[in-house]
Amino acid sequence: MQAIGYYNGEYGPLEEMKIPMLDRAVYYGDGVYEATPTRNGIIYALDAHIDRLYRSAAYLSITVPMDKQTLECELKRMVALMDTGDNVLYWQVSRGTARRAHPFPEGHANLMMMITPYTFPDLSEQVRCITREDTRFLHCNIKTLNLIPSVMAMQAARERGCYEAILHRNGRVTECSKSNVHILKDGCLISAPADNLILAGIARSHLFEVCGHLGIQVVERAYDVRELMEADEIFTTSSTSFIHRVTSVDGIAAGGRDSARFEALRDGVWGRFVKATDI
Ligand code: PLP
């Protein structure tokens, strides 16, 4: 099945869809977005993603052009159009369409959606990462379209044959280019606090829930690259990639010292997804 696109009520094959040149997403990245997997036609953690989209939009004074219930119906309609059960659903709301001028224009926001078939990643795979100075702005808690530093960081990782870039501000670990990063130390999970320096991932919240079931204490606090390198385990989480174990950072072996706990967490995160999307 080919991917499908949607823009303000119009559907079509994704590669054939066009959006207006004056959509503010094009020249300002003036919008917010969400992405989540679907399985068996079920959109994973839909309420949490919709709530975060409205929160992100509110931070930027963007009015989502429909209420939550209507948006939910539109998203479900997209999924129903696909004959593949496993997909990634992406949607974004931009501030609107107007000639280029910084102040907010009159008129309504634009809704864009795309759905693409997806093969879920192999979670038994161990991955390598690089570290990189976090040069993003100070509103990383808002899921905006302004992703250039993240794109550059991911590209740098890929050019070094790595899965992700672990970002830090002057040594303090924040997150990765498109995922959160966590460590295990002496049986506790340590994760950067949900402040303005990170996006509070939905998968991160699922991970914390799994920790609760397993009796693993969660400590949300700042930690630095030195602590990262000395951690028992290092791993990333995101909605579409779930959870990945990191065993090398900047070419140095790291983590990989608490297999039993990591595997229990990984099975818990994946099991939660399977349970929520089984029919
Ligand atoms: N951090 C960043 C910068 C991201 O872009 C993402 C996902 O896009 C995440 C974390 C993980 O968020 P979630 O678990 O909600 O997918």
Image (cartoon, rainbow, N blue to C red):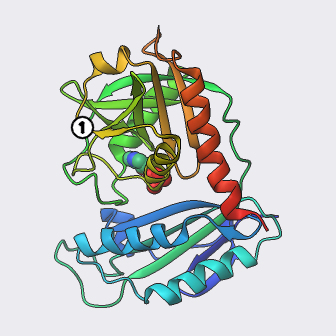
Which residue does the image show at 30% across and 47% down from the upper left?
198
Circle 1 residues within 10 Å: few <14, some 14–19, many ≥20: few
Q: Relative to residue 249, is residue 269 depicted above or below?
A: below
Q: Is mark 1 within 8 Å of ligand 1?
A: no
> From the image, which quarter does the N terminus lie in?
bottom right
x then y, percent, for residue 127: 57, 24
Query: Of the residues shown, which amino acid type is indicated by label 1?
Result: Arg
x then y, percent, for residue 268: 61, 44
Q: Residue furthest top?
A: 252
Q: Relative to residue 210, is residue 63 depicted above or below?
A: below
Locate residue 82 relative to residue 191 in the image: left or right. right
Which residue does the image show at 29% across and 78% down from the upper left?
62
Secondary structure under badge 1?
loop
> From the image, which quarter does the C terminus lie in?
bottom right
Q: Relative to residue 55, is residue 36 depicted above or below?
A: above
Locate residue 258 relative to residue 138 in the image: left or right. right
Which of the 4 image quarters holds residue 100? bottom left
- State the residue in front, 56 or 182: 182
Which of the 4 image quarters holds residue 3? bottom right
x then y, percent, for residue 55: 31, 71
x then y, percent, for residue 126: 61, 24
**Residue at numbered disc 1:** 221
Which residue does the image show at 55% across and 82% down from the upper left?
72
Q: Number of labelled discs? A: 1
Q: Relative to residue 12, is residue 197 depicted above or below?
A: above
Locate residue 243 relative to residue 232 in the image: left or right. right
- State the residue in front, 77 or 218: 218
- State the residue in front, 207 or 102: 207
